[in-house]
């Protein structure tokens, strides 16, 4: 393939499947990365939602425990003062020192409210008020313990409000003083104030958690929507690429296969690469056909005379057996001619005869050399009514051979002619012409002998040729 042919081949049209593939892969990688990142964000937000929900549950439980612990302590201190039963005192101290639901709940709430300083402040105020109330409860339990004659008190009770304890008279006055501390309205008012502060802090906390949950849920919905779009776009890219492959590669390839199996040139179709392939193949196809034609022509061309040889004759006659006339032409005494004048002169006569045949006969006729000194002419579009045309052509050939410009000794020709008839094939026609030629040679007078006739036609000009 020449450089110019390569340049023409590179001018192939169509969409480049390579460019489409690279673009699709790049887009797919980008979208896959986006989808992966979005999936990671979704996972992080889900984790944040789970953490917020856990905090919400934890804080809700802490609020409940705070209120339950406070109410439990109030119940135990009041029951102890009313009944003097040591079990209530012990239950109070166990809750205060061991279970400590209030303290643990406050720690949980403070940790969750670390970003809301106002709420933390209200919670600390509530805790301080609760501790002050606990001092009253310890003082009340000490007064009641003294009234009921209980000893071995917990140090928190034994050391509670010593000044108040010393100022209170003995006997029923101590029990009354204890009741004043935990059973009157000011105690309930203090508890309500503590509950209000705790509730304000917990409401702020729950509002914050609910807001976080709502924001995160909205965020995850947005991320899921974006993820769906990314996945949908990725699927669209895959579908477009597959459709492009089908339309611009698979279908054209199937048509290429059909044409290749039929030995036909390819019609450029589909992607740029297939256009390029088709153009390159067609150039090779054309080059091969030209080479085949050249080889065939060389194989069917007589090297001495330049006209067709026996192979060309066989090939032509195999496809031209209707409405033809076959002439077999033999140089009389050519063997002796060669012996007398030499083979170089004989070759020159053969060349001159070939030139005379090409000049005398039509371009649609087919002159050829089928043996050493035997020639044939296949005349197309002929019938028996045109026999005079054959005579005139032979006369022209004889005239050309008789010219002395080449200083070649004169030769005579014997010609056998046969017209094709219905049902005759190439072998039948050749046999008929061969019979006519044999009859002409036996007559030893030169001229043309037509198959089926009993006399040789003299080599004279014929009118109305």
Image (cartoon, rainbow, N blue to C red):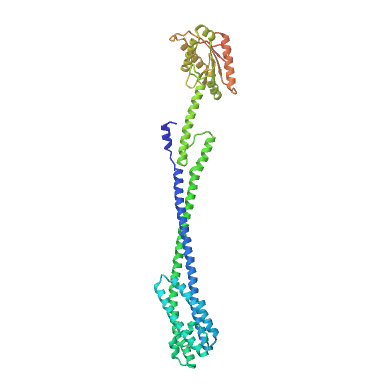
Residue closest to the eye, 146 or 404: 146
* Residue 408 in the image, given as x and y percentages of width and height: 46, 9
Residue closest to the eye, 19 or 349: 19
Q: Residue at x 48, y 93 (%)?
A: 170
Which residue is most to the top?
Answer: 340
Q: Residue at x 42, y 70 (%)?
A: 114
Q: Is residue 436 left or right of residue 143?
A: right
The answer to whether residue 146 is visible is yes
- Give the mark count: 0
Q: Residue at x 49, y 29 (%)?
A: 289
Q: Say which quarter of the image contains residue 214.
A: bottom left
* Residue 3 in the image, given as x and y percentages of width and height: 41, 32
Q: Say which quarter of the image contains residue 191.
A: bottom left
Residue closest to the eye, 18 or 249: 18
Which residue is most to the left?
Answer: 118
Quadrant holding the N terminus:
top left
Relative to 341, is 431 above or below?
Answer: below
Relative to 72, is 449 above or below?
Answer: above
The answer to whether residue 332 is visible is no
* Residue 63 in the image, given as x and y percentages of width and height: 48, 75
* Residue 376 in the image, given as x and y percentages of width and height: 53, 17
């Amino acid at each position: 393939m020449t450089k110019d042919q390569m340049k023409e081949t590179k001018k192939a049209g169509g969409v480049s499947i390579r460019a489409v593939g690279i673009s699709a892969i790049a887009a797919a990688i980008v979208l896959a990365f986006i989808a992966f990142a979005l999936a990671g964000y979704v996972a992080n937000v889900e984790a944040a939602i789970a953490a917020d929900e856990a905090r919400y549950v934890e804080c809700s439980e802490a609020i409940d425990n705070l209120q339950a612990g406070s109410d439990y302590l109030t119940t135990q201190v009041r029951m102890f003062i009313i009944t003097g039963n040591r079990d209530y005192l012990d239950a109070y101290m166990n809750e205060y020192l061991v279970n400590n639901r209030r303290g643990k709940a406050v720690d949980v709430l403070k940790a969750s409210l670390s970003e809301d300083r106002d709420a933390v402040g209200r919670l600390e105020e509530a805790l301080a008020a609760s501790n002050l109330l606990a001092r009253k409860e310890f003082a009340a339990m000490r007064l009641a313990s003294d009234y009921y004659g209980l000893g071995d008190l917990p140090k928190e009770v034994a050391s509670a409000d010593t000044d108040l304890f010393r100022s209170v008279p003995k006997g029923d006055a101590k029990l009354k003083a204890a009741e004043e501390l935990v059973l009157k309205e000011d105690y309930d008012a203090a508890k309500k104030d503590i509950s209000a502060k705790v509730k304000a802090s917990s409401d702020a906390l729950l509002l914050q958690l609910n807001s976080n949950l709502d924001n995160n849920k909205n965020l995850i919905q947005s991320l899921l929507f974006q993820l769906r779009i990314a996945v949908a776009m990725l699927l669209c890219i895959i579908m477009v690429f597959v459709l492009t492959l089908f339309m611009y590669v698979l279908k054209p390839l199937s048509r290429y296969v059909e044409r290749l199996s039929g030995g036909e040139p390819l019609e450029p179709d589909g992607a740029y690469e297939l256009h390029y392939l088709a153009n390159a193949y067609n150039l090779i196809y054309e080059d091969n056909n030209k080479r085949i034609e050249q080889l065939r022509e060389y194989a069917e061309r007589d090297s001495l005379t330049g006209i067709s040889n026996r192979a060309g004759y066989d090939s032509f006659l195999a496809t031209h057996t209707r409405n033809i006339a076959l002439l077999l032409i033999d140089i009389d005494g050519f063997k002796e001619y060669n012996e007398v004048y030499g083979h170089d002169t004989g070759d020159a006569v053969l060349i001159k005869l070939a030139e005379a045949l090409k000049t005398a006969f039509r371009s649609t006729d087919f002159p050829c050399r089928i043996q050493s000194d035997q020639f044939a002419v296949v005349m197309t579009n002929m019938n028996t009514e045109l026999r005079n045309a054959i005579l005139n052509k032979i006369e022209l050939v004889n005239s050309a051979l008789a010219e002395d410009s080449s200083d070649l000794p004169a030769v005579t020709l014997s010609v056998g002619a046969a017209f094709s008839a219905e049902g005759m094939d190439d072998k039948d026609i050749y046999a008929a012409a061969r019979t006519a030629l044999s009859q002409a040679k036996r007559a030893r007078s030169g001229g043309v002998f037509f198959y089926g006739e009993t006399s040789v036609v003299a080599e004279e000009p014929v009118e109305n040729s």
